[in-house]
Image (cartoon, rainbow, N blue to C red):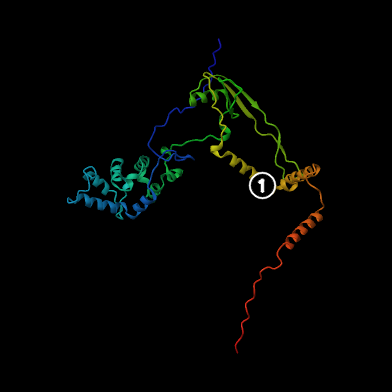
Amino acid sequence: MPRSRVPPTLLTKLRHPREATDGPRLWNAKRRIKTSKGLSPEQFQQFKQTPPHVWYNAYISLQQDPSRTGLSSHQKFAPAELYAIDRTVNDRGELEWWKLDREHLDKFMDAHPQLSNVSGDVRTFIAENGHTLSKSKILQLLRSPVQYFSASSNVPLEQRKQIYFPDVKDAVVLMRTPHLGPRYAAFDVPLHFSKLDMKAYLKDVYNVDVLHIRSVVIQSKVQRKDATSPYTQGALFRPPSQKKMTVQLAKPFVYPAEIKDLSPWEYDTYWNTMKAYVAEQRENSIWGSTQPNLEHRKSIAQQAQQLLKGKDKWAPTWQAFADTTRAMQGVATQLPKSLPTRTAPPASTSVK
């Protein structure tokens, strides 16, 4: 007895999903969510003018002075914390505070007037990679965390949260199909997309159950490439074919109503500007130098219609110029003959 075939399934989820960490988020995305917060320009300038070791020494002297009561009990460093901070002093007497562990790092940054504004994901990154960071890297990170995380060389591979944007050719596009019923939806899919891919895609991404799928590949028409000169024709080529799928849904779906009022997006202004720009580009190209001037033809046709209807009277060009000259002379004769003239100043006499 032959064995029954089990239909293949498409795995669209990771077998071993990655654990959620509090590291840099969307570091390599083109449109990042601005959650990583560093120092503002004013705070960064103050941080450079007052180095951490200078502030630390002043803070310890304030803590040890019993006459000053500006610090509360939770703002003071314990002896163990003082010992951990003193161990990060290098040979030049500078305080490498970014090499502290997470507990002591949070206490140090909370007490610092500028470092207390840094977000939690940046603190997590400093605590996990402090032993590999230098002073210049720390300054770059505090100035602009988003710009620092956007460079792949600055973030270790195990801490990256990569976000993959699909190629335009591999996108699944839902089409507006008012002729189909509410239980059917049409999609433009890549050529390598199969029915199993479509079913798994709708189920895993949108949690939509599919009953039936029909697919068709539409061959594109033959086109010509742009010619190199106005006296030759371009080479023939056929664009890639297009694949469409019609899906029968388990639950009805109604496409949202189409937006008719496009005034909030300045559609008319954008459309008129682009039309004028394209027309100017065409006139300045080879096409404009080889094609007739349509605007000039329209103006000549309008003048001919005016003459045929008797609204205008035809006259040769020299006669029109003569009429214009006579009109200008008539205006000149109407001017008053005695116009006020400016008298010349008397000549200066030379004294010998």
User: In the picture, residue 219 is in which quadrant?
Assistant: top right
352 and 243: which is toward the camera: 352
315 and 106: which is toward the camera: 315
* Residue furthest out toward the top: 1
Where is residue 304 shown, x and y percent of the image?
A: 79, 44
Give SS at disc 1.
helix
Where is residue 96 shown, x and y percent of the image?
A: 32, 49
- Number of callouts in the render? 1
Where is residue 286 shown, x and y percent of the image?
A: 72, 47
- The quadrant of the picture occupied by the C terminus is bottom right
In the image, is residue 45 above or below residue 104? below
Q: Is residue 303 left or right of residue 119?
A: right
User: In the picture, residue 177 is in which quadrant?
Assistant: top right
Residue 98 in view of the camera: no
Q: Amino acid at mark 1?
A: Glu
Q: In the image, what residue occupies the spot 60% across and 88% down?
A: 351
- Badge 1 local density, few (<14 within 10 Å), some, or many (20+)? few
In the image, is residue 167 above or below residue 118? above
- The quadrant of the picture occupied by the N terminus is top right
Q: Is residue 217 left or right of residue 143?
A: right
Where is residue 202 shown, x and y percent of the image?
A: 52, 24
Q: In the image, what residue occupies the spot 30% across and 42% down?
A: 106
323 and 206: which is toward the camera: 323
* Residue furthest out toward the left: 66
Q: Is residue 209 left or right of residue 306?
A: left
Residue 218 in view of the camera: yes
Q: Mark 1 — residue?
A: 280
